[in-house]
Image (tube, grey):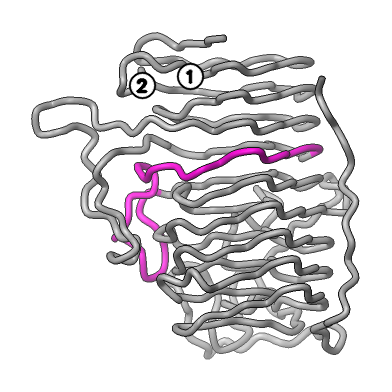
Amino acid sequence: AILQSAEVVNLSRNVVISGDDFEEISCDSSLPEAIPGEQTSLEGCRCASIRNSCTVGLHTAQMLGGSARIENTRIEKCGQRGIEGKYCLHFHQLKACPSCIFRNNAIETSQQRGLIVHGTHLSTSEANVFYNVRGANIYIEDGNELGNTVSYNVAICPWRYDEGGCSVPGTSNSQGDTSLNQAGLYAVTPTNNLIGNRMANHFNGMFIEVNGIGRGPAYGKVCTRYAPVGRIEGNVFHSNGRFGTYFLSNNYPLLGTGQSVSSNGYTGSCNAFTPSGEDNGYSTALRNNFDYGNAFVGNYNAGDIQFSHHTSIDNLNLIYWKETKVFADGCSAHIRDSYFRGGTMGLPDSLGSFIIEN
């Protein structure tokens, strides 16, 4: 039996972080750019080709040291559209922080994203609910983040995606926030644990965009398209305008990349082959995820990644996969013990056999 159920979330909390209503402020052309090419500033609303004003609410952050723990709290009227680093909940450049926890919070009505994990490792973001959050609701930012657990969160967009949905223009990310590819859960690296989350009615449910070399302080120090994939299991992505499960670009996880918490997640090696010429791929599986009511499910180019016990029903494209390769172990199936119904299957060109196995 397949269990499909609607999300029912509680947006009330006894502790509330709130502020004035959103304010529209004018831009300042003299402000410095935070990240070259992204057209935002840490110091305020910077004039740019993509904005001449900013919409500002409150923001919270733990930055550059220490730890933060926010639980059972409602955060509302938050986010500062077009200003770098101003979000509802934000772990910022904390490196290893296993004591950093955002749990059981309700985030409602944001102008710029919801919960951000940035340059931080081993944190926990669990059982939070997001409603009417513009841009990516959960956002893993630079590409060096390792071992963070994002689990049992629910993010619902209440607006029709053909009328803009929860997209927002004028941020530092022209993909994961805007009408091009807004996402419930957005990450630049797959090396984190994404477990039991539900993303409904976004443009994309889960969008893993490995851009190759990271951004910000991690730029040029990581090769995210070859990063090992963490535990991605038990998630539900439904009623999204484009993809439910979505891996963009080339995703070919490797062994021996040298990434570790002690190296701040920076990569030591991106060699696709061992010195003796053997395939250096790191076989992994996406397990027990459920996609329904989306346009697409899958990835563009991906190897050594298995869809295991995946359920995909009533999607226009039950699986969409352009290119792949034989698994490094020589025998694993690309799709295993999965169920597909009510749509078409776009299977890839493969360097070798493409294996579907029961």
Q: What predominant SS class does the magenta segment belong to? A: loop
How far is mark 2 from mark 1, CA to CA? 8 Å
- From the image, tell me which residue sits under label 2: 327
Residue drawn 24% across the image and 32% down it: 280
The answer to the question of whether label 2 and label 1 lie on touching residues, with beta carbons closer than 8 A, is yes
Residue positioned 49% across, 31% down in the render: 285
Spot occupied by residue 133 in the image (x, y as percentages of width and height): 78, 63
Name the amino acid type tagged 2: Phe
Q: Which residues are magenta?
A: 212-239
SS at badge 1:
loop
Task: From the viewer's perspective, tell me whether residue 108 is left or right of residue 102.
Answer: right
Task: Give the image location of residue 127, x and y in percent.
Answer: 72, 59
Q: Which residue is labeled 1 in the image?
A: 334
Q: Quadrant of residue 81?
A: bottom right
The amino acid beneath tag 1 is His
Near-viewer residue (167 or 257): 257
Identify the residue shown where x is 87% and y is 84%.
21
Farthest residue to the front: give it: 99
> Mark number for residue 272?
none
Residue 168 % position (x, y)? 73, 62
Say what secondary structure mark 2 lies in. Answer: loop
